[in-house]
Amino acid sequence: MLPSLAPLLADMNLWYSLPLIVSVSLVCAATRHEQIMPILTHAARFALWIGVFMAGVMGLLSLMDWLA
Amino acid sequence: MVTTKIPASDNPEFADEMIEIELRSPWIAGLLAWALPGLGHIYQGRTGKGVLFFVCILGTFFYGMYLGGNKVVYAATDWEQQYRWQYLCQLGVGLPSAPMLIQKGRTAEAGKHPILGDYMRQPKRSVDARSDDSGNQAQQPNELAQWVIEEHPFFELGTVYTVVAGLLNVLVICDAAGGPLIIRTPDKKKPDQAESPPDAEST
């Protein structure tokens, strides 16, 4: 699945979201904890949520495009 | 000096584990955190988090500037051009974004040339016609329109990066001044312990 998804992501410039997701999740997690392990755990969970949210919005837009 | 006790984790299983943080001079730390991301934490001796904030926020900010061809950070409040509200968010990064305030309003049309050259200067109101990729002459209404077309889509991407970096630093300032905000999920087994707020005491 990933090889077929990569050109799509590149075409939509979605790769540029990855550094932003990493940065946002790390900083937000670090403002919630003081120790490194809880920060990393929270950041991983937060990044996953952002990914799921973005995928959901993308799915919704794709569905609307398909219905139009 | 303010000492704050916070839960070691937001995990209810470790509800009893507390760690103590010394928040040295919260106002000074907050000001330093604004001036340079992470500096407030380093001032308080929280070096690890300081370095993390420094790398993440300044990395995001300067990568955004690089993506946007060093044109996305500028301050313009001139209603005749497009009002650049994004600069208010970008200012959150602190001193690295401050040159745009020096450059603000300094345009050739206003008779005041930018002091720092093209660095963080606002776009001109008029621009010469240029050839596009097809060799046709194209005249844009102002330099901002030309930048957007030339850098598309990286002008928008760079703007988003720099805006997000500035907003993230607001969280960092709050963390430097008041300590981390731990939101603990309610413990179903021990509701009394889970709802007890973290202690804060001044010494």
Image (cartoon, grey):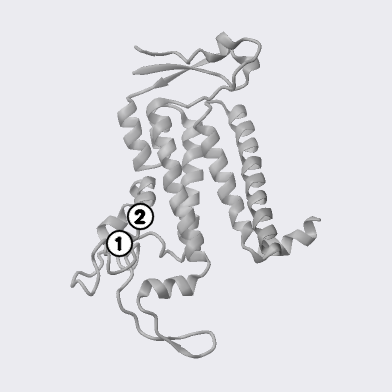
Mark identifier at residue B182: none
Q: Residue at x 70, y 58 (%)?
A: A63
Residue B87 versus residue B117 in the image, above or below: above
The kind of residue on which mark 2 rests is Tyr
Direction front: furthest residue: A68
The kind of residue on which mark 1 rests is Ala
CB-based contact (under 8 Å), mark 1 and mark 2: yes
Direction right: furthest residue: A1
Crowding at dot 1, Cα within 10 Å, few <14 / some 14-19 / many 20+, comes out as: many
Quarter of the image for the C terminus of chain B: give it. top left
The reply to whether label 1 and label 2 mark residues of one chain is yes
**Closer to the camera, B39 or B180?**
B180
* Residue located beneath label 2 in the image: B87
Give residue A60's quadrant in the image. Answer: bottom right
Residue B1 versus residue B124 in the image, above or below: above
Give residue B77's quadrant in the image. Answer: bottom left
Left or right? Give the position of B108 relative to B84: left
**Closer to the camera, B35 or B105?**
B105
Crowding at dot 2, Cα within 10 Å, few <14 / some 14-19 / many 20+, comes out as: many
Of the two numbered discs 1 and 2 on the same chain, state the one appearing first in sequence.
Answer: 1
Label 1 to label 2, Cα distance in Å?
A: 8 Å
Q: How many marks?
A: 2
SS for dot 1: loop
Name the chain under label 1: B
**Closer to the camera, B79 or B106?**
B79
* Residue located beneath label 1 in the image: B76
Q: Could you tell me residue B163's position as x and y percent?
A: 44, 52
Q: Could you tell me residue B88's position as x and y percent?
A: 34, 51
**Closer to the camera, B113 or A10?**
A10
Q: Residue at x 35, y 46 (%)?
A: B94
